[in-house]
Every structure is written in C-alpha cells, then in structure tokens.
Amino acid sequence: MSNKLKFISVSVFILIFGVSMVSGINFRTETFSLLGTGSLMESPAYFLGDIIGGTLFPGTFWILFDDSTWPTDDPGTPENERWDYIFSHYFIYDDTPENEGWDGHFPPTGSGEPNPTWRFYTVAGDTVGGTTAGFTITIRDFNGNGILEENEYASKVISSNIIAWINFSGGCFNNWCGMGSLSGTLDVVDAETWEEELYVPSAESASGLLNLRDDGCQLGVKPASWGEIKSFYKN
C-alpha cells in the first residue's frame, strides 16, 4: 500500500474513532432560579434558600464564601471593620461616565484565594455542586460622586460562572460535571443586620443555566466547611 493510501486509511480511522468517542458522551442542560437570604457580615458568609424555577425545581441551594481571613466587626467601635475590609479588598471603582460603580470580585484576580462554593439539592434527592468562577457583586454609583451611599449598597447586581465537579454530584447527576452561569440581584432586606436577599430570576422563566456531560470529568477541591454548611442547612 502506498504511503498516501496509508495516510488516508489512518485519517479515516481516526475520524471514525473520534466520532464514536464523541457519540458516547451524554449531554444535558439544566435550568434554575434561586431565592434566598444571607449576609457577608455573617461568619461563615453564605446565602441559602430555595430553587424556585427551572428543571431543578423544586429544591434548595447554598453559596458559601471563604471568610477565614475576614475580620469580625468590633461592636465597641463606630465603624464596621468587617465591611471595611471586604470593600477595600474586593471592590474596584469604575469611573466610566454614566456607568460609575464598584465591582467586587470574589476572589480578586490572581489573589490565590479560594473560590466561593455552591450546592443544589432537588427534592427528589439529587445533588449537583462545585465552585464559582469569578463571582461578581456590582454596586452602582448612581450620582457618580465616588462615595458609597446607603441606598446604593441596598440594591446590587450579581453574576458568576459556575463549575460543577463530579465529586459533588449524586442521584441522577452521579458522574456528571460541567459549567454554567447565573445572574441576578442582591438587595438589603434588613439594614440593621445586613441581611440580604439573593435572587436569580425567575419562577416563570429560569435564567440560571448548567451544561452538563458525563465524560471527561475531574474532581474539585472540597473545603472542610462544606459539610458544616450542609448540616446546618439540613437542620
């Protein structure tokens, strides 16, 4: 057989083999909407609540931030040391005209800090979870004066890519992993306690998205505090 024919034969074999490999991978798309409460002022810092729409409805969720290096507030001082640290460490001002505001990146790019973690539980007993990839909280500076005011902090926008790791899946999601995204709002509901409402719309049209597959999955790092939050939430 000539070298040319050999090359063509090998190329066809690789193509057929590649197609057969891809055809053996299963894909699924899941959607979700979230409504919960929590606060960055609490330790641990987390948000938890209900899955109110989408293919994962009904169910519950939590999102956990690593606050192991954050200070606690000293009630004997007029300032809030915890918030002062969060604001100075995570938030960067954007002075673009007509779009002024602060973008808080959790974690800051290149910081090496752990990413926030998340978990979804369906009432059917299925579990999917993992880490966020760039959780962002945006505060608009409505009057463009560069000073954070109470009404500006009260209504914020959130967005994040999310990664589902195979070792955090269970039930019908056993052996599944993938990526997705979420966006929504984070509004203060109690100014005294700093409690906030996290909302990913909506019950009628779920905007949260997960694209999953059952091949090529990797393990994610499991922080020790995950079990603690799961236990707390289940109780």
Image: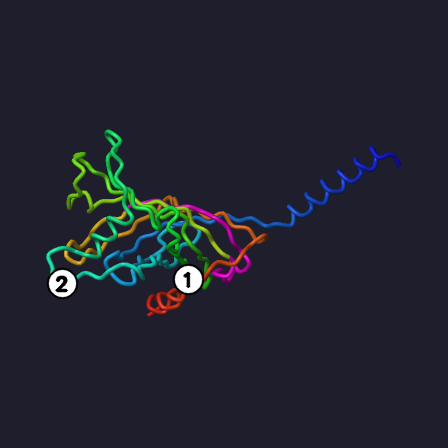
Q: How many marks?
A: 2
Amino acid type indicated by mark 1: Val
Residue 53 got which mark? none
For the point 16% across and 62% down, the residue is 74
Amino acid type indicated by mark 2: Pro
Which region of the structure is painted magenta?
166-185
For the point 31% across and 53% down, the residue is 35
What residue is disc 2 on? 75
Query: Of 229 and 103, which appears nearest the observer?
Result: 103
Query: Of 21 and 224, which appears nearest the observer?
Result: 224
Residue 123 got which mark? 1
- Colour mode of the rendering: rainbow
Query: Along the polypeptide, which appears first: circle 2 or circle 1?
Result: 2
Is residue 192 toward the left or the right of residue 232 in the image? left
Q: Position of residue 180 (x, y in %)?
A: 45, 47
Q: CA distance from mark 2 to mark 1?
A: 40 Å
- Secondary element under disc 1, as helix, strand or loop, is loop
Q: Is residue 23 magenta?
A: no
Locate the N terminus by quadrant: top right
Q: Residue furthest right?
A: 1
Which of the two marks, 2 or 1, is nearer to us in this view?
2
For the point 29% across and 48% down, the residue is 90
- Secondary element under disc 2, as helix, strand or loop, is loop
Query: Of 35 and 94, which appears nearest the observer?
Result: 94
Q: Position of residue 17 (x, y in %)?
A: 72, 45
Quadrant of the rendered image containing residue 157:
top left
Q: Is residue 100 above or below residue 82?
A: above
Q: Position of residue 64 (x, y in %)?
A: 34, 58
Locate the C terminus by quadrant: bottom left
Quadrant of the rendered image containing residue 222:
bottom left
Question: What is the crowding at mark 1: few (fewer than 14 residues within 10 Å), some, or many (at least 20)?
Answer: few
